[in-house]
Image (tube, rainbow, N blue to C red):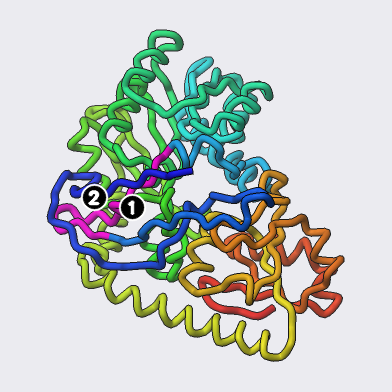
Amino acid sequence: MTISCIRRSDCRLCGSENLTEVLCLAATPPANAFVPKDLRSTEQARFPLDVFFCEACGHVQLLDVVDPNVLFENYVYVSGTSPVFVDHFRHYAETLMSRFPLEGRGFAVDIGSNDGTLLGFFKENGHSVLGIDPAQEIARQATKNGIPTIADFLTPALADDIVSKHGKADFITANNVYAHVNELTELTASISSILGHNGVFTFEVSYLVDVYEDVLFDTIYHEHLDYHTVGPLKTFFAANGLELFAAERVDTHGGSLRGYVQHQGGPHAANASVQDLIALEQRLGLDQAATYINFGNAIDARKQELTTLLTAIKADGKRIAGFGAPAKATTLMYHFGIGPKVIDFIVDDSPLKQNLYSPGLHLPVVSSDRLYAEKPDYVVILAWNFAEPIIKNHTKFSDGGGKFIVPLPEVRVI
């Protein structure tokens, strides 16, 4: 299958063409492009992972845009398979409902709703819900499970249709969506048209502060077109008739940003959190291109440390497996040059990924039973943000003499 990829020439937030390339990672296939056994000998197309800084507004982004239909229509990530994320979404929903209480039944819309995990908690509390997600099978299954979900991308036309059928929304959420979408202005206009006058739009994205401080470069992949900081987002929302009135850091995905947005002139008082985070970003130099160019040196240091360790282990005749097949693993393995000569197989708990082969490198993805059947000496936790529960759930492996390697934020052997 031929996959289209275009390169835009302007900033996704402000439209400026004054862009500086600040980081060049190894080209990869789409990070979730797992293949079945009969295609494992077929070479997959790779696309650039070049990161650009907008000199006009400070936004950091990819300009190479892989066809979103390819990336999302047959998506293989579901929130509900992770107890960590189920708990996160439960707390998230409870926070919104208590912070912005309604009198009576409300209407909650989730953009990029996946399997409906977050909306399920709004539904439990008596609110009507609607999911929007382009992943056809996941959307179908969510609807079957009681969370009505539109299997499509949100557009202004779809937004108008939703309002005509359901009315305005009290809550709109979008988690990681603001990293995924090429036309952010169009998406934001769609959200604005659905959002009620007193409603709140809440989004979560990986926070560039955490990516920078903890060298989480593997969160850079083709699904993630944008790497957000508060400063550019505040200006962007204001230019689109909205107000970012609060922002906070949360611990998902190694460190994320949660923003709270309302119509300009809305009822919710702005607090100091937005300016506090902008001040932090400026102290770290995240409003300057040179900071990201230097970031490449920190990535190279991590690469040297991990590959030296793995090379020594292999030279000693030991076997290594991987644990977790998240999208970020594709970037990490390609940029660090970790392939089938180093890792024998990858364990993943998602049935949607098991019995497939990893993007490009075509390592077999299997269930955790294989860990105990083959007993590798070391396991590299590619899903490093879940290292703690993975290690806790597999004490039998470590009790038997196996060792875990956590590659990021720091290389650790456990």
Which is more toward the observer, 121 or 25? 25
| Residue beneath the point at 61% across and 50% down | 35
Q: CA distance from mark 1 to mark 2?
A: 8 Å
Q: Residue 77 appears at what percent x and percent y?
A: 59, 44
Asked if residue 292 lies left or right of residue 320, the reply is left
Q: Could you tell me the amino acid type at mark 2?
A: Pro
SS label for mark 2: helix
**Whether residue 199 can be seen here:** yes
User: Where does label 2 land, which residue?
Assistant: 232
Q: Residue 39 appears at what percent x and percent y?
A: 62, 51
Residue 64 position (above or below residue 50) = above
Q: Is residue 194 magenta?
A: no
Q: Is residue 53 magenta?
A: yes
Asked if residue 268 lies left or right of residue 46, the reply is left
Q: Residue furthest top?
A: 164
Bounds of the magenta segment: 52-68
Which is more toward the observer, 253 or 377? 377
| Residue beneath the point at 36% across and 40% down | 181
SS label for mark 1: loop
